[in-house]
Amino acid sequence: MLLLFAGIMVVVSPAALLAVLGLATLSRTPLSERSVSRYAQASSISGLIAALCILTYMLTMDIRNVPLDFGDWVSLNNVAAESAHAPPHVEMQPPGALESTDDAHTGQFHFLLKFVFDRLSIPFAIMSFVLCGVIGAFAFRYLHLEEGYHRFFLYYAIFQLGMIISSLAGSIETLFMGWELVGLSSALLVAFFHDRPAPVQNGLRVWSVYRVADAAFLIAALTLHHLSGSGDFETLMGKGDWPAGHATITENQALLVGSLLLFAAAGKSALVPFSGWLPRAMEGPTPSSAVFYGALSVHLGAFLLLRVSPVLELSPLLCGMVVALGLITMVFAAMAARVQADVKSALSYASLIQVSIIVVEIGLGLRYIPLIHIIGHACLRTLQLVRAPSLLKDYSNLENALGDHLPDSGSVWDRRMSPSMRARLYRFAWERGYLDSMLDDFIVRPFINFFKWSDRMEQRWTMFLAGTKGADVKLKKENEEA
Amino acid sequence: MPVTTAVESTEQLVRRLAELLPLQGPITAFAFLNPLQGMEDRPFIEALRQVGEVFGCHPFLPEASYRDKMARGRITVDGLNEILAEESGFDGDYTIGGLVRHASLRQSMLQHSINPGTEHELRWMIAETDAIQRFRIETSHGVRESMIGSTRQWVSNEFPVSASASKLNSTDELMDVVQNAIPRTLLGGSGPLDESVWETVSLALLWRLLRTRIQRTANGHQGRKPQVRHRDRLLAISSEDSDQLVHEVLIRFCSVFLDQGYAQWKLPQRGTGFFQAFLSLFSSGGFFSKRWLRPVAAEVQRIHEAGMTALESLEESLTLLGIAPHEKENFVRGSLLALRGWAGMIWQTEERPDRVYIPSRHGTLIEFLAIRLILERYALKWLSRETLGYTGPLDRLREFMATQHSENGAVVTVEQRAFPLLQLAQLHGWTPRTIADLSDAQWQELVHAVEIFSSFERRRVFHLAFERKLMKHALDSVAIRASQPLISPKVSQLQVITCIDAREESFRRHIEEVAPDVETYANAGFFGVPMYYRGAGEAHYTALCPVVVQPKYWMVEDVVYALTDSGRQRARARQLLGTATHRFNTGTRGSLMGAVLTALLGPLFTVPLVGRILFPRLTAKMHRTARGFVAPPQITRLRLERPEGTPAGPDNDGIGFMLSEMVNMSERGLRDIGLTSGFAPLVIILGHGSDCLNNPHESAYHCGACSGSRGGANARAMAAMLNDPRVRRQLLARGLEVPEETRFLGGLHNTATEVVKFFDLELLPASHMRQLHLAVDIFGRVAERNAHERCRRFETAPLDFSPAEALQHVDDRTEDLAQTRPEYGNSTNAVCFVGRRSRVRGLYLDRRSFMMSYDASQDTETSIILARILAAVIPVCEGINMLYTLSAIDTRGWGCGTKLPHNITSLLGVMDGAASDLRTGLPWQGVDIHEPVRLLFIIESTPEAMLRIMDQDPTVGRICRNEWAQLAVLDPNTSRIQRFVKGEFVDYQPSTTEIATAESSLEWYRGWRDNMPFALIQGKNGI
């Protein structure tokens, strides 16, 4: 019973914060800065305590997996095609007692809202609560009197809820839900200062990359449903507790689903070729750019790979792809990080290096090390990003301690490389690997051109059907607009 | 900007226009200078008239904000009238178009918001509100009645009967308009109509009439802005911004070029200069770069092979872009200012190489401009092809674009022009009939009178009225106080010399309230000791003097000989720690080392993270304790003296001052502030500085007279010189006797935590311990009081704080990682008083006044002392004031916007977010309580002396004559005040002889957050 209550608390406390702040905004009831901060604190603390309770309980009782099943949120029978809200029967089953309730191959559409507490989700959720809570406390004072104060905390609430749902997700559709909330709030936070053009443009860019990654995720989810009849990770990964699960699909299926998920993870974790968005995301207020992209959401891709690790294990080729992508990203990020002259870009590439190493670790079949690595990196990077405005003071303190200007750390680079090679590499790093322009060229441009072409075709078709000449159509259009 | 001469070369032009660039160098030495210093050669208002076009920034606050001040009584109707009455060529009693007094027309335009805003706003307003169906709320009942009555009469009686028989002298066209505006039902039916229908009819008629008439009236006041830059026109017609393309490349290049050592890989060929480094970077690779940028490689190759210099390339670009000689100035100016933060920083590193580690060589700004124009050419080529389908040569591009239709052009629509008239008609009761009856000449006069009183003019009047009210209040208060007897203790136990900073006003006031027998003085915070200074445990010299001065002396702080060993050990410990920290920091940013460090040690960092944010006080305490173990030993000495005859320099014998220099500085230090007799046994000289965390703008809180550093060393040096018996002997020979028992003590006032720290205490003789204890006790009590007074401005500090709680609060702010307002610096400054403290002692000036001590009776006939004081005080204070004022007026334009997205770059400055222009000026969090006004100098002197100084000193003359600051003189013997108006001094008639009084400062300000009126603080025994 306690476990059930705690489990619900973990999910409900961030949801309640969103409800309170959201309703206050909707009903135009301005809350004072103080009460916003109180609600946010209460939400983080209650969620954290509940998560810690579960952890303690699981450790003392030596339970490794506690599912929390809210049942199907939506369930569509394809025969009757009628929708029915499942009664919110929440059940908390002791491990092992869970019957296979999946309706495999019955051809139903269902959205299974399920959370699971295991050795992967609990540390991740606790980390999210701690970092969000700390950053919340930071932001209360940092954003004092700022015009967008309430807007920030509304996005913050969405973000925190998204992180918790993603970490605890027990089915792929639940994970997708959290994933979307994180994506939405991140894009909105990047565009937080919407009275300047750059944040809005960069926010839109982040959003576009996320959407592409989401599309891959969605296809993967559908495929998974198709293959196993359910999005429940338990069905997919077998009964073993994480990380000991065994997936029930074939190697080729795993390769297909895995590649799609890897694609999705690459978008979310800014792996090559999507790396361009990460430094661009540093437009929001420092606390949001700090945790949200630099430390938390950038790890979500790696987290996804960890969550579906049993699928990875099925296909050595897939593992190879994961390792290769990680390595490429690492090399790229290490170069790009070395030429950045501003602190936020430098830190975002430094983050990317670690994320790509984490991805390599996952590809190599490690499970606990990447998890520890994620947590350690998130904490350290959050601190560094939050202290980024201290850079000048830190530098002057360091120089005073050393008694001179800081030593040139690029000596090897200066000595061992031929000038022309150096110039080439420098240009490559300075242009951030040309990743943005290549995306623009090879994906965005053909895409736009295709739609422009479609538009022209459509016009011609209309003209043909209407039996009129172009001028008339244009005139009509104008008339309609008027 | 003097007038262009015919032979001015492009190089000279660029150098001349560079004066318009922001004057801020590295952000660690914050430059408090007027952002419009390059325009100080013309009158203030004239300069502001141009800033919209030149900089794209606001000259004044928005009208709504002035109306808000009006609602709060900070601007009065009388005040507005007073300003209007002073306008040259303005006759308020003249009746415009036979309709309305000119003065009353302007008043109504000021008091009521009648502006429709943009075309789209207006369209929305007409469609979605009842702006043209119902009268304004302000419309009086009488106007409403008569308007409806007259319309009803006009329409139902005269008009439908017979148009030809009407007495109207309007044209047929006008009749049509009227007819069209009247609903058919009205003309046909005869039944009684609702009042509200008539209201709508009246307004509809008016609206129609006004629009028709204005259509035929030329708009003589809102000409289209000249679009010399191709980019401006392109943006207007295609909504594509070529600057966006150019800047993305240029910002990234500037940041690595100017980088002072942050990036691990240095820009290759940096030493060859901006132009060559860019060429060589772009000559290789780049196949996958942005499409518009790809052809640049070939161009770079061509320029490289042709061996062109930057200047040649610049000239070539101007030709290729088709810039005619007469457009050159505007074009170059626009191109320079488009990315002015970076351009300004390049200019600063070029002009003041002494202020940066890696300077730029002479001519870098020209190289920057040359590169900019190369990029601009290709960006324009690309965009004009992509969006306009233009493939011709660039020098014809503007002609081509001129033929293109612009959707969001700057043309003012008929509706936008008619709307204000509709509002005025409702306010003044002009019926449709009246409008129709106006002759063409009358009508034009009316339109002209309305349109010439533009948004700029209205805001100017508002601003001047606001300034005037505050000025009168200040002058009245000073006059009243000055008419009362001087207050100075007969025998001073203690004398305190502080900086002229506005923050020290309350500090001094509280000292005097706490200890009536203490005298306070103020001098510019570097105390006349300009030097490069390197403290014990510091790696580099810092310039401690106003930003415009280049010091000629060097000063070093050494650990005393007895502690050399301990000092050396600690230095080694610091070095080890520093190396480790540096390795760790670089490690976490690297790959493999980073992986090991983050995975192994990462979780440990939750401790400092949580500690710093949730328990800042405890963490700071632990931090301080830990640092105490390795800090340099507390007992140090300045290396004050260098041998007579050796040249000054940064090493060995060059450090310090020669005895003769010390004597000169000492003499000046005392004579400037008029402290030449009546010395107390202990004289404390206090520099000031501030503490805060996580704040790139930290330097802006330090002493503005020390280029944004702490002024403690200057105070310490001054005290040490004055304590030197040899100096005293020579001073005596120059007629300045400092009694033997008088000791000087240097110190540092922390304006954030209110802590006062003393230097060289161990040199203070035992005989002076009593005075020292007295001083410590006084400063302890003052700290609480001053903190309390400051806390009233912090919204997070409850108004019912006790002084002790307030002191804790201000201390906490400095240790809070998330605090964006550690203190408010010189925010709210409005006045600068130069004169004897005894004349204004006891006046509560609300931390709004700079204070400089000066005693006219000790000056020479030709006011040599005043002249040299003002040579520093006027530019320094005016610079601080203008920076605050302009930053508060347009925080994004002149200031650096909100601090939240700031991103430190190149170790030199901050950008907004991922990449932007370098942001200069003050952040919003530093000026949100500042009221923009020009500084009012009140100088205890005579008009003759001031006029003479203005003639002698071109800078002072320029600032005062061109009205960049307001000026008044207070007679040294009476309370007569004369204001400097349009080049001459005129008597000021105080508007009141009454002033609020209170028993203490606390009693006066308690419970208030906003600015306070000035008041007399009369202690229990009259101070």
Image (spheres, helix red, strand yellow):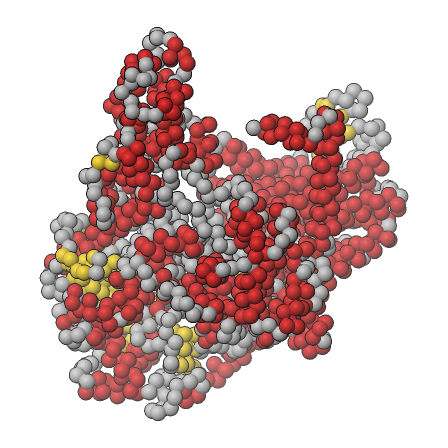
Q: Position of residue A63 (x, y in %)?
A: 74, 44
In the image, what residue occupies the spot 41% across and 77% down?
Answer: B533
Quarter of the picture holding the N terminus of chain B: bottom left
Instruction: Pick the residue in front: B150 or B926.
Output: B150
* Res B584 seen here: no
In the image, what residue occupies the spot 16% across and 67% down?
Answer: B944
* Res A346 seen here: yes
Q: Is residue A414 above or below residue B221?
A: below
| Left or right for A191, reference B458 | right
Q: Is residue B980 above or below residue A251?
A: below
Instruction: Pick the residue in front: A277 or A466.
Output: A466
Residue A459 figure quarter = top right
In the image, what residue occupies the spot 20% across and 67% down?
Answer: B946
Q: Is residue B724 above or below residue B14?
A: below
Instruction: Pick the residue in front: B606 or A436.
Output: A436
Quarter of the picture holding the C terminus of chain B: bottom left
Q: Is residue B381 above or below residue B359?
A: above
| Left or right for B61, reference B434 | right
Q: Position of residue A424 (x, y in %)?
A: 70, 68
**Count of numbered badges drawn on the protein:** 0
In the image, what residue occupies the spot 62% across and 42% down?
Answer: A184
Q: Position of residue B396 (x, y in %)?
A: 57, 54
| Left or right for B69, reference A77 | left
Instruction: Pick the residue in front: B774 or A110.
Output: A110
Q: Position of residue B290 (x, y in %)?
A: 67, 56
